Image (cartoon, grey):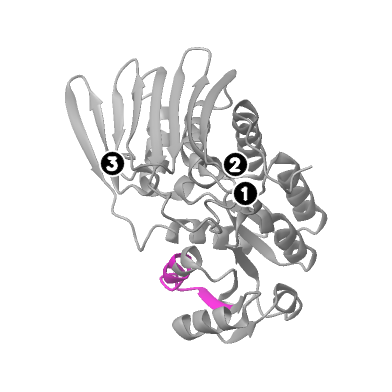
Amino acid sequence: MESKIKWGILGPGKIARKFASDLQLVEDAEISAVASRNLNRAKQFSDEFNVEHVFGSYEELFESKTVDVVYVATPHNYHKDLTIQALKHGIGVICEKPLGVGSSEVKQMVAASKENNAFLMEALWSRFNPSIQKIKQLVDDGAIGDLAYLHADFAFYALDRDLDSRLLNPDLASGSILDIGIYPIFLSYLLFGMPNEIMAKSKFHENGTELQTSMIFDYENAQAVLFSGLMGDSKMEAELSGSKGEIFINPRWHETDGFTLVKDKEEKVFDLPLKGIGYYYEILEVHQCLRNNQIESNLWSHQNSLDLAELLDNVRGKCGVTFPFET
């Protein structure tokens, strides 16, 4: 691998532009190629980010030998096929969450990573956020004692979106659970592990799209109360309570720049400003893994993604959330 790691962007939309802006902050990163099924969209992205290689199909990029790793930012239902194609070409992949639509897809993607000895990571950027990393360390070190309670929400109003949008079109794996519910579920999993029982209930659009979901994850000595929704805004705060203290994560908690630890009636404020938008930190992790010839991250491993997919499956099963393309 040359001194700079060469990136390819698949699906040059809004999220890809945010990711690319943070890629520009990483000294040993180069955006070498972009691909879209719409060549004009790829050219617009190329002009914006000064990308040398532009392709009107994903297969052309995979065969071009112009990249070391690709960022998959397409709608959810394209993740599996594009990721597996890239891996078969020996190209590393960081794929937007959810890694796949269901655990069966994630299993196939992980298998392809291992079979082709190629790097694969779910773009769960919150895992690499400095505040989330510090909170995880404090919890593991017993700073707030035995964990008892977590509350985390993620919601915004999206009913004004086009019905063909990825948020509202069931053919694109629409709804809140996979798109934003994954964040509260991730936080509960990160701090508590796999729950003993899940309770969940959803509200639906007339076209079948799940619009909001309330969840309780029940653990042996703790509970997590989680929520995701597209019917209105929420504060997007997160609170963690233990036998010796509490942690309050600044909103929007999934991209937070700090938190407050309350212990013995005293508050300690942790200010951890982000570099760029916040994708910067997962990019650094990808680079470290690639340079160490790893096929998975130690911070967010293949098994972590498999576990998260299982939790998402469980929640969807409780609520009766399915998509037309699923058999």
Is-magenta flag for residue 29? yes
Residue at far left of view: 266
**Residue that carries the numbered disc 2 in the rendered image:** 208
**Is 172 placed above or below 12 here?**
above
Density class for disc 3 (Cα within 10 Å; few <14, some 14-19, many ≥20) is many
Mark-to-mark CA distance, 2 and 3 = 33 Å
N-terminal of the pair, mark 1 or mark 2, is 1
Q: Position of residue 185 (x, y in %)?
A: 51, 34
Amino acid type, callout 3 = Asn
- Where disc 1 sits, the SS reads helix
Instruction: Please indicate whether residue 14 sits to the left or right of residue 315 in the image.
Output: left
Relative depth, front residue between 72 and 44? 44
Mark-to-mark CA distance, 1 and 2 = 7 Å
**Residue that carries the numbered disc 1 in the rendered image:** 170
- Where disc 3 sits, the SS reads loop
Relative depth, front residue between 162 and 194? 162
Residue at figure coordinates x 44%, y 59% from the top left: 279
Instruction: Please indicate whether residue 97 sits to the left or right of residue 252 in the image.
Output: right
N-terminal of the pair, mark 3 or mark 1, is 1
